[in-house]
Image (spheres, rainbow, N blue to C red):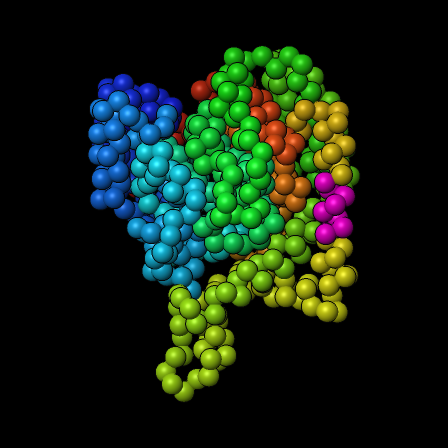
């Protein structure tokens, strides 16, 4: 196996900029890795829905030329990256893993994609996801599930399982995801990678195919906390094309990650959320989390228990608010303007064509959420369902505000369990939704949160994630604590080459 695929983005960037290795060589190594292990949904990791090898090599050549001229576009120039396939790209299809958009090529790049290109990063291709980002396992993709590199029979999380599995499998050092209820952090936890949900509004959503507009947030997937911070710095900042974009300066996330790596958390107050434990939590997950709490204390942090009683309302509130917004956002897929069109044979009226197209183009989970949302917004149910969910959201925001008056960050397990077998929860939506139990509150409140690997579960040897939540516009706090913990945990915290070799052997 090529050594280059095992290096994190910061080290790859250092070597590329020192001209010890070229961006073309690094890009080729990752393209070869993808060819070796990605494969179809039936047998491989299946992280990618579209690969642009020619475009990636051309971008790598351009980065090498700029570096040779002494004008690298950014500290990450020349480093490969994968893009979740709900981010618009002019040079690659954007499908949101749905048949209704199969083969669609957008006329513009998402702002984050444009910023990556301007920074000299090398897009490799588009990664798999649950259709329209609706799911927690990537099993809802119209093009087949992605698989967890730690165990190909298990899910890599969702909705961004393609991005997380690509990073974990060594197919790319960096990826972008979107997080509506945990879709970056939950996949990060179950694949042993770092996943970050920035403060809402600090990373542009322009060009992100909307699922739930008040909850969606684009963020980085990486192999280390510093890598995530470096990528966060590239994509963050105000965007005039996004009306929800905030004007506040981006928190100093790279500086915080570097400071945290020195391993001193003296003076940092860490709150353990008492509601995120107990029944329903896998013993191995709780064991790894307890060990993480101990490590944070040894690093000098003051650890206290904090109660956030309204967090118990987060799951039902989310599954009313998100489907309601989805039912509105997905109304644009009407077979009239772009995408799939079924029944346009001169014998069906426009409303019939629309109905036939949506029936053929949307998968079961998307249809379920559209129906839930439409019902919640109906005249007879609005106050009883959607209105109450928004009131619960307010209570959750108040719980966060009160907790952050006594603590700098809050912590919890990222997920109640490790990666479950593919198909295990396919016929039980409620069990599937519980995978997002710990991550949803931060989306409802709009504050920052990330997941960092915290070892392996004693139950099954699979990765466990530590979630670190920070106030809005205080993302740097989460990065500092995560980086300190990562250094203290040592090399065993995330996916490592022995696991990836086992993957190759199994194929």
- The reply to whether the magenta stretch includes residue 393 is yes
Q: Nearer the viewer, residue 40 or 256?
A: 256
Q: Residue at x 58, y 12 (%)?
A: 264
Q: Residue at x 73, y 69 (%)?
A: 379
Q: Quadrant of residue 498?
A: top left
Q: Residue at x 33, y 52 (%)?
A: 90
Q: Position of residue 94 (x, y in %)?
A: 38, 54
- The reply to whether the magenta stretch includes residue 124 is no
Quadrant location of the C terminus in the rendered image: top left
| Left or right, residue 262 beside residue 315 | left
Q: Can I make out residue 287 in this image?
A: no
* Residues shaded magenta: 390-397
* Residue 162 in the image: above or below residue 380: above
Q: Residue at x 49, y 48 (%)?
A: 241
* Residue 418 in the image: above or below residue 131: above
User: Which secondary structure dominates the residues rendered in magenta?
Assistant: helix
């Amino acid at each position: 196996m090529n050594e280059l695929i095992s290096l994190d983005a910061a080290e790859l960037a250092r070597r590329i900029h020192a001209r010890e290795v070229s961006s073309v060589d690094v890009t080729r190594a990752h393209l070869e890795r993808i060819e070796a292990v990605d494969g179809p949904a039936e047998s491989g990791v299946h992280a990618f829905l579209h690969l642009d090898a020619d475009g990636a090599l051309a971008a790598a050549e351009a980065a090498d030329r700029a570096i040779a001229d002494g004008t690298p576009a950014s500290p990450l120039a020349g480093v490969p990256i994968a893009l979740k396939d709900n981010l618009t790209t002019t040079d690659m299809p954007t499908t949101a893993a749905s048949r209704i958009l199969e083969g669609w090529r957008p006329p513009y790049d998402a702002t984050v994609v444009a910023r990556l290109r301007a920074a000299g990063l090398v897009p490799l291709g588009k990664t798999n996801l649950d259709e329209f980002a609706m799911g927690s396992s990537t099993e809802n993709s119209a093009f087949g599930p992605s698989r967890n590199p730690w165990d190909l029979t298990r899910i890599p999380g969702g909705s961004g399982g393609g991005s997380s599995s690509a990073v974990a499998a060594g197919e790319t050092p960096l990826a972008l995801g979107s997080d509506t209820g945990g879709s970056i952090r939950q996949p990060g936890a179950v694949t042993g990678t770092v996943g970050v949900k920035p403060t809402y509004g600090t990373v542009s959503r322009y060009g992100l195919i909307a699922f739930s507009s008040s909850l969606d947030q684009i963020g980085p997937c990486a192999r280390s906390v510093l890598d995530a911070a470096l990528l966060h710095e590239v994509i963050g900042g105000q965007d005039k094309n996004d009306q929800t974009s905030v004007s506040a300066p981006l928190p100093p996330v790279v500086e915080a990650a570097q400071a945290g790596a020195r391993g001193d958390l003296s003076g940092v107050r860490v709150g353990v959320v008492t509601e995120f434990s107990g029944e329903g939590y896998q013993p191995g997950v709780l064991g790894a989390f307890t060990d993480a709490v101990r490590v944070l204390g040894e690093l000098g942090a003051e650890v206290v228990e904090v109660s956030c009683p309204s967090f118990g309302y987060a799951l039902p509130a989310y599954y009313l608010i998100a489907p309601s917004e989805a039912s509105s956002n997905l109304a644009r897929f009407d077979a009239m303007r772009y995408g799939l069109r079924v029944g346009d044979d001169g014998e069906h009226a426009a409303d019939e064509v629309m109905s036939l197209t949506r029936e053929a183009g949307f998968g079961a989970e998307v249809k379920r959420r559209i129906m839930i949302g439409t019902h919640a917004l109906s005249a007879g149910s609005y106050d009883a369902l959607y209105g109450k969910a928004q009131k619960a959201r307010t209570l959750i925001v108040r719980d966060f505000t009160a907790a952050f008056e006594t603590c700098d960050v809050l912590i919890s397990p990222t997920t109640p369990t490790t990666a479950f077998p593919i198909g295990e929860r396919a016929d039980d939506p409620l069990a599937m939704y519980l995978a997002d139990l710990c991550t949803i509150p931060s989306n409802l409140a709009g504050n920052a949160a990330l997941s960092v690997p915290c070892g392996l579960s004693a139950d099954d040897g699979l990765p466990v994630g530590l979630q670190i939540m920070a106030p809005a516009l205080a993302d740097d706090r989460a990065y500092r604590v995560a980086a300190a913990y990562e250094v203290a945990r040592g090399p065993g915290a995330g996916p490592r080459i022995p696991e990836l070799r086992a993957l190759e052997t199994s194929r």
